[in-house]
Amino acid sequence: MKLKHYFKSFQFNRLFWEVFAIDFIFFSILGISFSVVSNLLLSWSNKAMGGMNVDQMQNFFTTASPEQMLPIATIMRNYLLSAILILLAMAVIYFLLYSFTRGLIWNHLSKKKLTKKTYWKWNSLNLALILPIVLYGFVAALVKLLFIVILRFFFTLNPTFYVKYENIFDGFFLILNGLMNLIIVLVALTIIFLAYHTFTQKYKVWESVGNAFHLFKLHWSKLWPLLLLATLTAGILTLVLLPLKSWLQYQTFILTTVNLIISVFYLAWFRIYLVKTIS
């Protein structure tokens, strides 16, 4: 039954493509604007430094007189202040746009409409989710580190055997680390998505955060197969795309676009698969 439900999740209807489009537009805007601003700040930085590299700038401040340093120091100060203000403004804009697109997606999945009043509540929910998700990430990272340390300890009980097959063990730990990172991210996304799903019903911020963890525990018998199959799907996608990524390794823009499309596609699939599972 679970496998049947899993295979049915790959029936991509209009709802899926609408959700995909919202996320794709959001992340495209995010990536393009960040790239433009980064290049702009780099250009300003070169002008502020008068064309000097870091070593030349360090040498200049070491040997120059106070009168010579003052104009450059003023320019650098103005550049740093401008850069900080721009980055802060971008962070606020990105956050507001993120909340707006989450509201669109999850109201769309719940067959509701996003209004001005409910939109601002989405900002409150996303702010409320920061602390529990950060705490979860911290605990999960510690557990992962402890598990790998213990596993490595047992493997090195026989140093001769470990040294003989060191390359194999290093490859194993590399794969294990990537696998555990993926599972940690998927669990975090599941908790966030459960909070979003609950939020569209009542628009109660802290109640939705609490219900996310409650639903995770309540539906664990359904969620662990989902997480297992989602991990397997990500692994298959990675293996299938390896030749393509190798072929496009020098085509940075095309490779970035392909990665974005695949990531957004997977995210949209996982989101709808989760909603159908708990429903």
Image: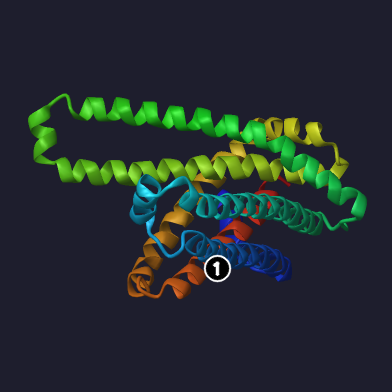
Seen in the image, is 63 located left or right of residue 32?
left
Q: Where is residue 112 in the image (x, y as percent from the top left)?
A: 87, 56
| x 48%, y 68%: residue | 256
| x 77%, y 40%: residue | 125
Q: Where is residue 81 in the image (x, y as percent from the top left)?
A: 63, 49
| x 58%, y 49%: residue | 77
In the foreground, 42 or 97: 42
Q: Position of residue 158 (x, y in %)?
A: 12, 26
Q: What residue type is labelled 1?
A: Ile
Label 1: which secondary element: helix
Q: Position of residue 140 (x, y in %)?
A: 49, 31
Q: Residues within 10 Å of mark 1 (few under 14, many from 20)?
A: some
Seen in the image, is 132 located left or right of residue 116?
left
In the foreground, 119 or 68: 68
The residue labelled by disc 1 is 261
Residue 1 visible to the viewer: no
- Name the image quarter holding residue 53: bottom left
Seen in the image, is 22 located left or right of residue 223?
right
In the foreground, 83 or 120: 83
